[in-house]
């Protein structure tokens, strides 16, 4: 699974990844997995109208109960929201 940034009207498969590496959806059940975001280049900053999406690939027949928490940094204020 990947977390991608999309502009208005853009398809999920065309989004720009904001992670350093995709999540392996075959990790151990009930065990949190953390990933770091990429650098704060302009390509990774959200503007009005942008959105984030989860992009799943591969066979997901055994996948159930996924929970995703994103922490976003407000660069104007210098803290996380």
Image (tube, rainbow, N blue to C red):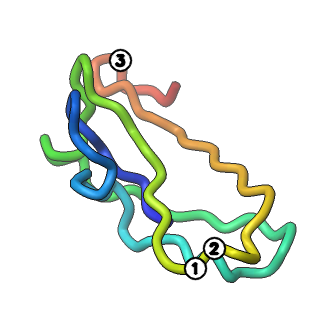
Disc nearest the viewer among 1 and 3: 1
> Do callouts 1 and 3 mark residues in contact (Cβ within 8 Å)?
no
Which of the two discs, 3 and 2, sits closer to the camera?
2
Give the CA separation, mark 3 to mark 2: 39 Å
Left or right position of 28 against 68: right
Q: Element under label 2? A: loop
| Whole-number angstrom distance, CA of label 2 to CA of label 1 | 4 Å
Q: Position of residue 4 (x, y in %)?
A: 35, 51
Residue 22 position within the rendered picture, expressed as x and y whole percent measured from the top left: 44, 71
Q: Which mark is residue 11?
A: none
Q: Is the C-beta separation of discs 3 and 2 under 8 Å? A: no
Query: Can residue 6 be seen from the camera position used here?
Result: yes
22 w.r.t. 6: above or below: below
Q: Left or right of 47: which side holds 37?
A: right
Q: Which residue is mark 3?
A: 77
**Residue 51 occupies quadrant:** top left
Q: Earlier in the sequence, mark 1 or mark 3?
A: 1
Mark 1 neighbour class, 10 Å CA radius: few under 14, some 14 to 19, many 20 or more: few
Dot 3 lies on which element? loop
Q: Residue at x 53, y 39 (%)?
A: 71
Q: Give the labeled residue for mark 1.
A: 59
Question: Helix or strand or loop: what does disc 1 sit on?
Answer: loop
Residue at 26% over, 20% down: 49
The answer to whether the residue labelled 2 contacts the one labelled 1, judged by CB atoms less than 8 Å apart, is yes
| Above or below, comparing residue 78 to residue 15 in the picture | above
Label 1 – label 3 distance at C-alpha: 41 Å
Query: Could you tell me if residue 36 is visible in this image?
Result: no
Residue topped by disc 2: 60
Q: Residue 44 or 55: which is nearer the viewer?
A: 55
Q: Earlier in the sequence, mark 3 or mark 2?
A: 2
Tell me which residue sits at (44%, 62%) in the image. 2
Residue 16: percent from left, percent from top: 24, 54
């Amino acid at each position: 699974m990947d977390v991608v940034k999309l502009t208005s009207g853009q398809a999920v498969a065309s989004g720009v990844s904001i992670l350093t590496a995709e999540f392996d959806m075959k990790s151990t059940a009930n065990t949190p997995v953390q990933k770091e975001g990429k650098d704060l280049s302009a390509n990774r900053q959200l503007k009005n109208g942008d959105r984030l999406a989860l992009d799943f690939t591969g066979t997901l027949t055994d996948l159930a109960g996924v929970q995703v928490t994103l922490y976003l940094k407000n660069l104007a204020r210098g803290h996380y929201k």
